């Protein structure tokens, strides 16, 4: 690939006892969130360790304060058609160790078509585990999402409302935290997803398609289409400050160029973009040194 | 007066009243012939559905005599194309052990005849120890109610025509042709040859009528059996009161369901207001449920905009559709009426994830409408738009999320199948395309007034129409090559977005190819 790939500095060492740290972190989170001290939470163990799923590559996981994406909480995904793929790859990992179904709340009419079972199956997602709900408007979609997040019977809830009033977003986040269910707000820009300045979600991603590299045979002849490539940008992330990971200030990459592997849902190739602009790919190239070694993460 | 129906392209008499019969008009006759016999004949179109409804109402009325009432199942098997509803319809009443309540069998029969006559029905009734004998006597015996003592069937039936044995179709005609007209004639015949010549059905009917073999009658099920009702001393109007009463009624229903091992799939709550108006609220569930708090919540969601008006006097709740539901350990505490007051609708208390997912589906479908909650099912079709179908959860036979997918292989498709997009347009959209080679992939396409430059393409994958399906049948003289064959390409544009396009039909110089956009890859 032309966008070069360089080795990430290893994630900051977490100290002698990662388990204890995770426990403490969970407690801090419980304290910080008034919603988490609902009666049920009190009845359970005082602080659950946060269950996380990999984003798809260790290099990206390391950039998150949880070293992965928390499976209990709300995440926003913006972008174009690639956002669907990113969402599907997250769902595959969220479903990995549970039998619970997914609730996917969609607008009743979508000019860009309906979810296609065979396509989801190709992305590794079992279409039989989807419960599809069509809402006539945002109110219905948000209501269905909240019901789903509260029920604790689901592995994840995906929803595509056009707009999210701040209070509704907050309610979703609290519901997701209480029940320990992942909520994904999938808001493709071709469907009128508007970005609000603030949101209650734990993280916000923007996923855009990027020109892919065709597979070449001998003599540089193009023999097939290469795997899809996405430009993955972590736009917002709560608790980054708590871990001294103010992304902007730490100069850590917030954007990556990834290659999506349909079979595993992982990103076998990851290239960091320095400040999120495509122009700096060359810059990353220079930093990578003379021998950029490709980093294969089978996370 | 007669009713007519269209049979084999002509209007034929389906049923005629006594006056018409007296003029020589009989069922099966062409309407033109009947008009020739009696020009002033009043004619109505036959309404089998209404007839059946009327018969059902009658069957309900007949339940005053016995709980065991069935509609004559002869129905369409009558063979004349009119069904048996054209005046020959009947009801079975099993009055075993009921007659003494009406002062004996004769009194019961007389009462029945009188009641039907009073309501304007011309009815004939007969009583015998076997359904078959009673059927024959009611239709061909003397009028006014014939009662056959046990054992007297042979004697009573002997003089009746063979049609009284409910032998229809070819066997009936064959018997007519050889001159076996009365039941007595059949009784004289050796059984072996009879069965060989006219089929076993003849002997079976004979035995049934004479009581040599049993004939089970399946009674009409009386729905709803599981119901509860609450009458208020004073009309209530507050939502809280109505909700509390609903919960109480659900407790009774749950207890009834528990004893019968059933769960509710559909429930109707009828609220009668003081001003004699009423409103019905219906809920449905994805799988059988008898958990009162869950059902109460479904009703609460559904009744958000309920207007009590001047107050509600009576509430009646019925489980109109039930399905067997095994006893579950986890549900026992929730079923006790005492557990109803503390509204523990929090699903965290249910251990079984599938169970609480079903509850969630019920709530979603209750508010958004049953058609809005669907699941994807794979279908054995290689047309992309038919291969995956969204099926409403309530329509589905299988319970949710509990068992393995039935055909996981269908999702993957054939091993050499091309890639499939993650989103598919239900209706492919026509696009304008620029292709340098007529049967190659495009280099540019226009969709929704925007131009997309193709940087990368893969294909084609050829998908032929399913010509064996009636909807896809080709026009005469056409071949699949020009109709419906699609060549699919996976296309990448400058920004890296991927589309699924296809060209319909094979390229022909005299016809510009038509291109469509069908899906979006991630």
Image: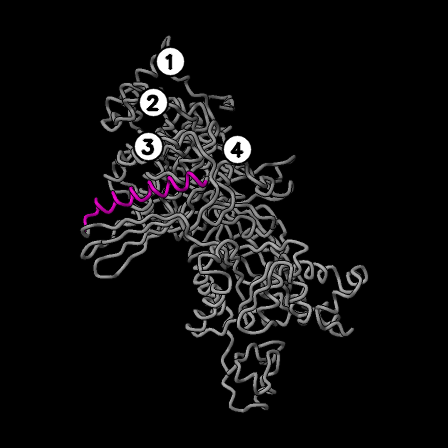
Label 1 sits on residue: A19
Label 4 sits on residue: A261
Measured in 3D between alpha carbons, the distance from the residue under mark 4 to the one under mark 2, in whole angstroms, is: 25 Å
The x and y percentages for residue B212 are 68, 55
What's drawn in magenta, residue-wise?
B237-260
Question: For the residues carrying marks 1 and 2, which lies nearer the camera in this image?
Answer: 1
Other-residue count near label 1 (Cα within 10 Å), few / some / many at <14 / 14–19 / ≥20? few
Asked if residue B259 lies in the magenta stretch, the reply is: yes
Q: Are marks 3 and 2 in contact (CB under 8 Å)?
A: no
Other-residue count near label 3 (Cα within 10 Å), few / some / many at <14 / 14–19 / ≥20? many
Q: What element carries label 2?
A: loop
Q: Is mark 4 on a helix, strand or loop?
A: loop
Q: How is the image coloured?
A: one colour
Measured in 3D between alpha carbons, the distance from the residue under mark 3 to the one under mark 1, in whole angstroms, is: 23 Å
Label 2 sits on residue: A65
Q: Can residue A282 be seen in this view?
A: no
Mark sitting earlier along the chain (1/2): 1
The x and y percentages for residue A111 are 41, 53
Measured in 3D between alpha carbons, the distance from the residue under mark 3 to the one under mark 4, in whole angstroms, is: 29 Å
Mark sitting earlier along the chain (4/2): 2
Which chain does tag 3 point to? A
Mark sitting earlier along the chain (3/2): 2
Mark sitting earlier along the chain (3/4): 3
**Vertical comparison of B437 with A251: above or below:** below
Label 3 sits on residue: A176
Mark sitting earlier along the chain (4/1): 1
Asked if residue B162 lies in the magenta stretch, the reply is: no
B282 or B77, which is in the foreground? B77
Which chain does tag 4 point to? A
In the picture provided, is B34 more to the left or to the right than B190? left
Residue farthest to the top, as pictured = A16
Measured in 3D between alpha carbons, the distance from the residue under mark 3 to the one under mark 2, in whole angstroms, is: 18 Å
């Amino acid at each position: 690939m032309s966008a070069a790939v360089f080795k990430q500095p290893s994630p900051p060492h977490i100290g002698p006892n990662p388990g204890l740290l995770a426990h403490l972190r969970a407690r801090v989170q419980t304290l910080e969130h008034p919603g988490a001290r609902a009666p049920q939470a009190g009845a359970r163990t005082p602080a659950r360790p946060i269950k996380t799923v990999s984003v798809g590559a260790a290099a990206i996981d390391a950039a998150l304060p949880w070293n992965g994406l928390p499976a209990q909480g709300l995440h926003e995904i913006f972008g174009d058609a690639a956002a669907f793929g990113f969402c599907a790859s997250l769902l595959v990992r969220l479903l990995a160790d549970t039998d619970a179904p997914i609730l996917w709340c969609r607008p009743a009419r979508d000019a860009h078509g309906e979810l296609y079972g065979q396509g989801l199956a190709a992305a590794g997602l079992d279409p039989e585990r989807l419960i599809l709900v069509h809402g006539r408007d945002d109110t219905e979609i948000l209501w269905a999402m909240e019901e789903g997040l509260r029920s604790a019977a689901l592995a994840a809830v995906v929803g595509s409302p056009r707009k999210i009033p701040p209070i509704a977003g907050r309610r979703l986040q609290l519901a997701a935290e209480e029940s320990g269910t992942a909520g994904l707000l999938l808001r493709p820009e071709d469907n009128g997803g508007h970005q609000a300045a603030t949101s209650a979600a734990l993280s916000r991603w923007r996923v855009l398609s990027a020109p892919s590299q065709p597979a070449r045979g001998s003599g540089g002849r193009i023999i097939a289409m290469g795997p899809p490539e996405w430009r993955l940008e972590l736009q917002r992330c709560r608790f980054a400050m708590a871990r001294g990971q103010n992304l902007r200030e730490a100069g850590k990459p917030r954007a990556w160029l990834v290659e999506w592997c349909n079979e595993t849902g992982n990103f076998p190739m990851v290239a960091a973009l320095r400040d999120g602009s495509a122009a700096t790919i060359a810059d990353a190239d220079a930093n990578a040194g003379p021998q950029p070694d490709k980093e294969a993460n089978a996370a | 007066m007669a009713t007519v129906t269209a049979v084999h392209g002509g209007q034929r008499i389906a049923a005629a009243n006594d006056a018409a019969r007296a003029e020589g008009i009989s069922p099966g006759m062409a309407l033109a012939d009947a008009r020739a016999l009696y020009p002033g004949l009043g004619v109505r179109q036959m309404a089998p559905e209404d007839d059946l409804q009327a018969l059902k109402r009658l069957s309900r009325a007949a339940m005053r005599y016995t709980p065991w009432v069935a509609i004559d199942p002869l129905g369409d098997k009558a063979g004349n194309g009119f069904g048996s509803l054209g005046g020959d319809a009947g009801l079975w009443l099993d009055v075993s052990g009921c007659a003494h309540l009406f002062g004996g069998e004769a009194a019961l029969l007389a009462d029945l005849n009188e009641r039907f006559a009073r309501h304007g029905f011309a009815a004939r009734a007969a009583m015998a120890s076997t359904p078959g004998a009673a059927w024959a006597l009611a239709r061909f015996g003397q009028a006014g109610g014939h009662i056959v003592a046990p054992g007297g069937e042979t004697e009573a039936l002997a003089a009746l025509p063979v049609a009284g044995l409910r032998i229809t179709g070819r066997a009936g005609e064959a018997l007519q042709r050889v001159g076996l007209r009365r039941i007595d004639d059949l009784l004289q015949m050796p059984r072996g040859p009879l069965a060989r010549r006219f089929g076993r059905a003849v002997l079976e009917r004979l035995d049934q009528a004479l009581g040599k073999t049993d004939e089970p009658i399946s009674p009409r099920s009386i729905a709803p059996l599981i119901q509860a009702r609450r009458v208020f001393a004073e009309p209530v109007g507050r939502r809280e009161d109505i909700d509390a009463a609903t919960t109480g009624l659900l407790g009774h229903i749950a207890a009834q369901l528990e004893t019968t091992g059933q769960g509710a799939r559909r429930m109707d709550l009828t609220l009668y207001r003081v001003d004699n108006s009423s409103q019905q609220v219906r809920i449905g569930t994805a799988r059988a449920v008898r958990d009162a708090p869950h059902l109460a919540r479904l009703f609460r969601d559904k009744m958000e905009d309920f207007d009590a008006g001047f107050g509600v006097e009576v509430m009646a709740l019925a489980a109109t559709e039930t399905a067997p539901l095994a006893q579950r350990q986890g549900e026992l505490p929730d079923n006790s009426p005492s557990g109803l007051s503390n509204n523990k609708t929090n699903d965290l208390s249910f251990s079984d994830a599938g169970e609480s997912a079903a509850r969630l589906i019920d709530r979603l479908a209750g508010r958004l409408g049953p058609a809005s909650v669907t699941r994807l099912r794979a279908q054995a079709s290689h047309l992309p738009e038919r291969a995956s179908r969204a099926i409403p959860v309530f329509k589905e036979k299988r319970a949710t999320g509990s068992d393995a997918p039935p055909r996981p292989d269908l999702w993957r498709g054939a091993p050499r199948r091309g890639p499939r997009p993650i989103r598919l347009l239900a209706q492919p959209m026509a696009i304008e395309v620029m292709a340098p080679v007529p049967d190659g992939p495009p280099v540019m396409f226009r969709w929704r007034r925007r131009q997309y430059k193709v940087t990368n393409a893969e294909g084609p994958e050829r998908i032929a129409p399913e010509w064996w399906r009636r909807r896809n049948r080709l026009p005469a003289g056409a071949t699949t090559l020009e109709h419906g064959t699609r060549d699919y390409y996976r296309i990448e544009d400058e920004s890296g977005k991927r589309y699924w396009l296809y060209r319909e039909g094979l390229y022909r110089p005299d016809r510009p190819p038509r291109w469509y956009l069908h899906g979006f890859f991630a």
